[in-house]
Image (spheres, rainbow, N blue to C red):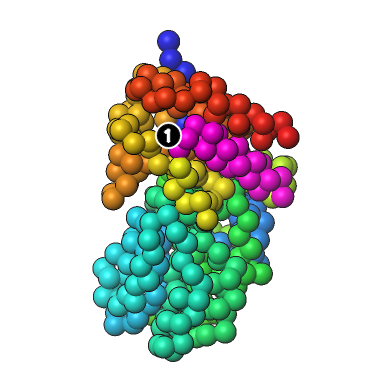
Amino acid sequence: MRKNYLLTPGPTPLPPEICAAMSRPIIHHRTPQFQEVIKEVHEGLKYIYQTKNEVFMLASSGSGAMEAAAANLCSPGDTVITVEGGKFGERWTEIARAYGINCDVIKVEWGRAVEPSAIKDKLKSNPKIKAVFATLCETSTGVATDIRAIGEIVKDTEAVLVVDAISGLGAIDLQVDAWHCDVVVSGSQKGLMLPPGLGFISMSPKAWKVAENSKCPKYYFDLSKAKKAYDKVDTPFTPAITLIIALKEALNLMKADGLENVFSRHKKMADATRAAVKALGLELFAPGAASDVVTAAKVPQGIDGEKLVKAMRDTYGVTIAGGQDEMKGKLVRIAHMGYITEFDIITAISCLEKVLHQMGYKFQLGAGVKAAEEVFNA
Ligand SMILES: *Cc1c(COP(=O)(O)O)cnc(C)c1O
């Protein structure tokens, strides 16, 4: 018999309330019942986003919301800033280029966060920059970005700040209005504890002004259609009805907890995970900028990271993530995001120890679990 544990940075585990909500018979979307649901999730999303802006729901994964951001703000030939410190920062560049948008790329070494001053310098040297595309948590490296500092810089320019908060929203603090984030995209399968399939995007008044001049081609992701429907508590196309009903449950769970508690729970789990991997002699990949949603650590010398992750998953049912692209086989990434508690972390660390031990790595068995417990019981 095997029991499965999921500690990947998307998808994340589903609370039973959410599974139950999704098992109910489907209802039609142009009905008063569903309108009630939409009304509630619109309010709930504003709470999670900490914004007064509308937050639109798209039937797409998070990347669809990223594409919507580029397509609605820019025109072919515009220049934007992208920050590439990992796979998801690179995605901003790839999406923008697909629309004929020029990217002034800030390259950041994997495992490090962008210096906000680098963005300031680029904006100064080119006042025509349309947008700055940043990533709240670069999931491929575990790095958290100082969005607040970047917001302070971008707010005094003509450019709009666009934040990929697909991993991080509903797990770590992101004050969309107070930090001057014009456009914030997210997805359902990370901090929000839902299956994949919903994208989210908020637009500030400044973003709408910029969007008025956008000439990128768009239809399904044309946010002016979304806005028109939003104002009538409706959606422009058939929405992901079941996921939106589940979203209502997820938002209720998060409201019942309160954002402060949600954030402090994630911080505690991150502290414990970092302490555990360090106690095992693994080096943190992003020591200066580690996020509270996913911990990336280097696999010890002589250990095959791909085999390690595979054995944890296929032999013991504990799924964590490995490294991507240039870090393939060299990292373990343990997510502590969404419906995860301290006992999931203890399980993951215990399994990591078990497989490292079997692979011949020398360390004190139990050292990681002990370090994690010390954080949880402090
Ligand atoms: C998961 C993730 C994405 C991609 O989202 P999809 O839902 O897979 O399209 C983009 N950015 C970040 C930071 C992510 O963690």
- How far across and down, in percent of the image, does residue 296 sit? 45, 44
Quarter of the figure with residue 358: top left
Q: Is 218 left or right of 52, judged from the image as shown?
A: left
Residue at the spot 47% in from the left edge and 35% down from the top edge: 281
Residue 22 seen? no
Quickly name the residue at label 1.
320
Q: Compared with residue 14, is residue 355 higher up or lower down, i.e. above or below?
A: above
Q: Which residues are magenta?
A: 260-282
Foreground of the two, 113 or 365: 365
Which of the 4 image quarters holds residue 126? bottom left
Q: Quadrant of residue 74?
A: bottom left
In this rendering, is residue 174 above or below 254?
below
Residue at the image point whose x is 47% and y is 51% from the top: 286
Residue 312, horizontal then vertical, whole percent: 39, 25
Q: Which quadrant: the C terminus?
A: top right
Where residue 60 sits: x, y (%)? 40, 52
Badge 1 amino acid: Ile
Tell me residue 372's x, y (percent): 60, 32
Q: Residues within 10 Å of mark 1 (few under 14, many from 20)?
A: many
Determine the secondary structure under disc 1: loop
Q: Residue at x 61, y 26 (%)?
A: 370
Quarter occupied by the N terminus: top left
For residue 177, above or below residue 316: below
Q: Is residue 211 magenta?
A: no
Please tell me which residue is depicted at 35% across the width and 22% down the height of the picture: 360
Q: Main secondary structure of the magenta part?
A: helix
Of residues 311 and 22, the one drawn nearer to the viewer in this rendering: 311
Asked if the magenta segment contains residue 281, the reply would be yes
Q: Nearer the viewer, residue 232 or 255?
A: 255
Residue 342 visible in the displayed image: yes
